[in-house]
Image (cartoon, rainbow, N blue to C red):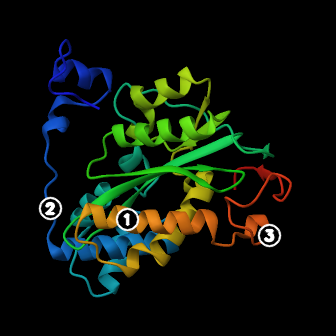
Amino acid sequence: MVDKNHPSLSVGAQCRLLSISRSSFYYELMGETAMNLDIMVVIDKQFFEKPFYGVQQMTWHLQNEGHVVNDKRIRRLMRLMPIYQRPDTRKPAKDHKTYPYLPGGLRVERPNQVWCADITYLPMRRGFLYLVAIMDWHTRKVLAWRISNTLEADFCVEALNEAVHKFGPPEIMNTDQGSQFTSFAWTDRLKRVGTRISMDGKGRCLDNIFIKRLWRSLKDECVYLHAWETGSQAKAGVGRWITFYNHQRPHAAHGGQPPAVSTSTQSKPISRCRP
């Protein structure tokens, strides 16, 4: 989203408008050792089994599995992985506004009533990437997605723009309190299309449970079965699985119908209360 050759705005001015630091625009993501990448995959898998594990519990788990690690290393690696809803790893950027959680107790009865978005970590053979997806809470359909090698907000906004262009704006958009979703670029786009902004409470990973289940299915059925070498391979693999998920994979919420096939008459209304 930042244009180095913009005729009137400097790189610094564009970064300020997008709520990102100038240094992060020029920053090149450093690679991790093969050992650390293997540990990150173990952390990623364990998260879906025990999402309440913090740094100390995850360190003990890895030590019990035979990994020689300490809590300092695990804390650093966990901060690289956008899967934890804890204040130290998913707090909003300084001066970014957060919003209340709106779907609690709401009866979701139709498409475009509530959307959700989230980011997850994609392990590669020699590194890792990040995936953002936007899902409709009623149909469970993935409306748009993007892959990035950084955690800046631009790839999230690109996915949002695609979803709004294809399906129209939702009444409510729910996310966590990550800096991508509290950024001006994200919140301003939602405000301009008249969408109410909702955010999970800190430490409440179940507030966005539907997209967390999507990540688990994607990881188990696709990501963990491959060792992608390049971003293009990851993009193609994720794209094939999401097409399968939307159009072929049976979903319990729709009596076995895939999300793209289901209609509002086939799906039961969802009553969302805080777990």
Three-letter residue code for mark 3: Gly
Please provide percent x and percent y for residue 249. 63, 72
Asked which secondary structure carries label 2, the reply is: loop
Residue for point 22% across, 18% down: 13
User: Considering only vertical position in the picture, is 171 above or below 67?
Assistant: above
Crowd class of label 3 (few under 14; some 14 to 19; many from 20; radius 10 Å)? few
Please provide percent x and percent y for residue 56. 35, 67
Quarter of the figure with the C terminus: bottom right
Dot placed on the residue nearer the N-terminal end, 3 or 2: 2
> Which of the two residues, 120 or 68, is positioned nearer the viewer here?
120
Residue for point 63% across, 71% down: 248
Q: In the picture provided, is 7 more to the left or to the right than 174?
A: left
Crowd class of label 1 (few under 14; some 14 to 19; many from 20; radius 10 Å)? few
For label 3, the residue is 255
Please provide percent x and percent y for residue 170. 65, 35
Which of the numbered marks, if any, corresponds to residue 31? 2
Residue for point 17% across, 75% down: 34
Dot placed on the residue nearer the N-terminal end, 1 or 2: 2
Three-letter residue code for mark 1: Ala
**Residue 51: in sight, yes or no?**
no
Quarter of the figure with the N terminus: top left
> Are dots 1 and 2 in contact, CB under 8 Å?
no
Marks 3 and 1, Cα distance to the nearest angstrom? 29 Å
Marks 1 and 2, Cα distance to the nearest angstrom? 22 Å
Crowd class of label 2 (few under 14; some 14 to 19; many from 20; radius 10 Å)? few
Please provide percent x and percent y for residue 106. 77, 42
Three-letter residue code for mark 2: Gly
For label 1, the residue is 236
